[in-house]
Image (cartoon, rainbow, N blue to C red):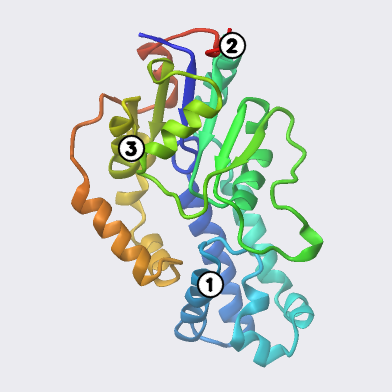
């Protein structure tokens, strides 16, 4: 099957987002408990509230905003100084676990050398997505990055998408529009001048990624390898549930997605990213105007 455009999810498709999140946050929280003497019963509910305020479980300025820490230390600067080792623990664990799945980079290079248009589409906010994209070297291969706009960032950081990408052009998805909205995927395809028939979409969520692609009429590939953490890290998911950014509205939205999921099996399922090369005849993207 001839394809000239690859549209890929990022988290748990090109890299193990969940392991990165759990390792870095659990390391940080354990240090916070140790240094402050405060319990998880005090800290984690405050964490959840901050995450909900900013619409992400990755809020990078979390410790400085926690009421219990502000009461204990008096200022954001004092928190930074007192909890420097907790911040270091977070960054060290993140660095340790921030790597691509096997065969991802090699496959992307082959696709790039073949002239394939490579698009990334994620629901993670732009600042955090852009950071991982740059650190992992994915900006060497990805032509377009579509992600939601950021929450408000500290003034000194400026625009969260101002990373010096080598190749990637960062674009925002519409505010409030999320997977599995098939129109969003169709709009992405239209915006790059591609046709549905020449695109293939890969992602790790059957209810969101695969359902969306199928409803849009795009060839779908289920990245089953990206779901392994569901069975191997129950403790991690317990922590994520405790500090989730999901509001009651988000929970209802997820319930609606589950209720409307049409449960058609994926067209293709892969256990390794490189299997894409065996499934499709990837060729140079020319665009509708060429």
Sequence-first tag of 2 and 1: 1
Q: Given the current orientation, which residue lies at the most extreme right position?
A: 156
> Considering only order in the chain, which callout, 3 or 2, is on the residue closer to the N terminus?
2
Q: Residue at x 40, y 30 (%)?
A: 202
Q: Which residue is mark 2?
A: 115
Few, some or many C-alpha atoms within 10 Å of disc 2 (few <14, some 14-19, many ≥20)? some
Residue 282: x, y in percent?
Answer: 47, 10
Please give the name of the residue rendered at 21% of the width and 48% of the height, measured from the top-left corner. Answer: 260
Judging depth in this view, the residue of 280 and 184 nearest the camera is: 184
Mark yes or no: residue 52 visible: yes
Label 1 sits on residue: 53
**Which of the marked residues, 1 or 3, is nearer the chain's N terminus?**
1
- Closer to the camera, 182 or 136? 182
Q: Find residue 92 and report its image quarter.
A: bottom right
Of circles 2 and 3, which is in front?
Answer: 3
Image location of residue 181, percent across then percent down? 36, 43
Q: Quadrant of the N terminus?
A: top left
- The answer to whether mark 2 and mark 1 are in CB contact below 8 A is no
Where is 198 relative to 74, above or below?
Answer: above
Considering the image in quadrants, where does the C terminus appear? top right
Q: Position of residue 137 (x, y in %)?
A: 66, 33
Q: Which residue is mark 3?
A: 212
Q: Decide: marks 2, 3 in contact (CB < 8 A)?
A: no
Name of the residue lying farthest toward the front: 289
- SS at badge 3: helix
Q: Residues within 10 Å of mark 1 (few under 14, many from 20)?
A: some
Q: Dots 1 and 3: beta carbons under 8 Å?
A: no
Q: CA distance from mark 1 to mark 3?
A: 27 Å
């Amino acid at each position: 099957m001839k394809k000239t455009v690859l549209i890929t999810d990022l988290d748990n498709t090109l890299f193990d987002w969940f392991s990165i999140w759990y390792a870095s946050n659990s390391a940080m929280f354990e240090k916070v408990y140790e240094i402050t003497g405060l319990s998880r019963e005090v800290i984690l509910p405050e964490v959840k509230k901050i995450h909900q305020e900013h619409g992400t479980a990755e809020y990078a300025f979390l410790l400085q905003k926690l009421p219990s820490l502000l009461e204990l230390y008096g200022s954001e600067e004092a928190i930074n100084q007192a909890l420097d080792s907790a911040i270091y623990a977070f960054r060290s664990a993140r660095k340790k676990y921030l790597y691509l799945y096997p065969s991802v980079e090699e496959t992307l290079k082959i696709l790039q050398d073949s002239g394939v248009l490579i698009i990334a589409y994620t629901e993670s906010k732009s600042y955090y997505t852009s950071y991982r994209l740059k650190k992992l070297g994915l900006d060497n291969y990805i032509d377009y990055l579509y992600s939601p706009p950021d929450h408000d960032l500290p003034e000194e950081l400026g625009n969260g998408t101002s990373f010096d990408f080598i190749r990637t052009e960062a674009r925002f998805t519409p505010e409030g529009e999320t997977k599995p909205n098939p129109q969003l995927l169709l709009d992405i395809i239209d915006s790059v001048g591609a046709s549905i028939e020449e695109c293939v979409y890969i992602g790790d969520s059957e209810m969101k990624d695969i359902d969306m692609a199928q409803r849009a009429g795009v060839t779908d590939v289920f990245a089953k390898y990206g779901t392994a953490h569901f069975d191997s890290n129950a403790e991690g998911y317990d922590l994520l549930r405790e500090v989730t950014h999901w509001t009651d509205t988000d929970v209802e939205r997820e319930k609606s997605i589950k209720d409307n999921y049409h449960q058609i099996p994926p067209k293709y399922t892969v256990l390794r990213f490189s299997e894409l090369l065996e499934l499709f005849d990837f060729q140079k993207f020319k665009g509708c105007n060429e």
